[in-house]
Image: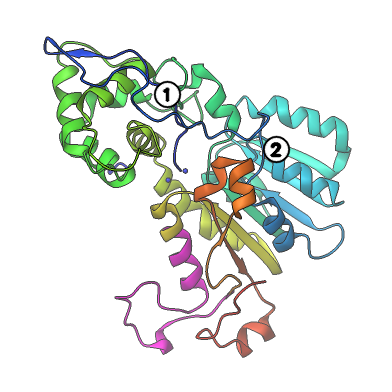
Amino acid sequence: MVWMPFQMLVGCSSPAPVERGGRRSPHPVGRWPVREDAPIGGGHVPVLLDAVLEALDTAPERRLLDGTFGGGGHTRALLDRGHHVLAIDCDPDAEARAAALQTAYGARFRFRAGNFTDLAELVGDERFDGILFDFGLSSFHYDTAERGFSFRHDGPLDMRLDPRRGRTAAEFLANASHGELAQAIRIFGEEPQWRRIVEAILETRESVPLRRTVDLTRLVEGVVSRRPGPPLKIHPATRTFQGIRIAVNEELQVIEAVLPQAFAALRPGGRLAAISFHSLEDRLVKRFFRRMAGQPEHDRDARPQQERVCQARVLTRRPIEATDAEVFANPRSRSAKLRVLEKPYATQTENHDPSHPPSRF
């Protein structure tokens, strides 16, 4: 299996130095930057909420699908606008949050437990005026030490979005080949010093299993060099945690699988909105949207226009990003990108020129 898609993890205060090979880590406690990607005041705050509402709140009482319920922030805002929302999530912890919305909003809100890779099965023949995906983690994931997503907390190295299935991050680290570790940390994590980290993991696991978040955090701190220059903005383990999480949950394959299912579940005139946090996630979304709009998917796509089929309109020429004010209030939004696609009515598709997409909805 090729290890393959959700954004930058939270920062943390540095744990105690680690000893490897009889040498103490040269980086003392507090040497690394402390950055905590939690909203001011705590709690879950949905990213790019105003832009999402602008994209999906286009008529009264729309039937919408939130494919990544998470903390329920986007769903609640759409319900407050009077819409009907079906929400999906594979995380068992999300079911309690969904039950609270069920009590508050009654029949206008429905929840189905499941992975959105099974979207077609979960929604059946139902069609929607708008579908939303937020491919990031919620604050609940980061704040729950037992889930193992954040190095701000000491907890088991789990990182599974659905803790009931699949192998944990600890199991991945214990058994992954050099190539799988390199793909996770270099490609998915975009970590410049990936070689040192991969070698340290392979060496360390021979004698000491990496079972807890603090184990991995200390290992990375012990091998990542602090280079001269301006202070680091993120903790050195940020990208490693991100890459391993992406590999454990096979997030890129999941996104690639769900986008066609979501487009098929749209009514004519419906919109598909996707929020990504990682460049590889955004690339998958961008290329799928351009493919559906009959546009070249990338710079090397030289197919003649007559070989393309225009089935949709891209409503965002460039991705929508958070304002400075939103990033200040909710640092998690700093890498968020929203793209929106519309499935036109047949006559709109026939008359649409794919080479001139609108700049915004």
| Residue drawn at the location 43% of the way across and 43% of the way down | 251
Name the amino acid type tagged 2: Gly
Considering only vertical position in the picture, is 164 above or below 46?
Answer: above
CB-based contact (under 8 Å), mark 2 and mark 1: no
User: At x 67% / y 81%, what residue is drawn?
Assistant: 346
User: Where residue 151 is drawn, which disc sits there?
Assistant: 1
Pick the residue in front: 270 or 156.
156
- The residues colored magenta run 284-313
Q: Is residue 287 left or right of residue 275?
A: left
* Left or right of residue 321, residue 35 in this image: left
First in residue order: circle 2 vs circle 1: 2
Where's the N terminus, which quadrant? top left
SS for tag 1?
Answer: loop
Quadrant, the C terminus: bottom right
How crowded pointer 1 is (Cα within 10 Å; few <14, some 14-19, many 20+) is rated as many
Residue 158, image x, y percentages = 42, 22
When the figure is inspected, residue 89 is found, relative to residue 312, above or below; the finding is above
Res. 72 mark:
2
Q: Is residue 304 magenta?
A: yes
Point 26% across, 21% down: residue: 27
Residue 174 position, x and y percent, is: 24, 21
Report the amino acid beneath label 1: Phe
Figure disc tally: 2
Q: Is residue 268 above or below residue 347?
A: above
Q: Is residue 278 left or right of residue 135?
A: left
State how far apart marks 2 and 1 are (Cα). Answer: 24 Å
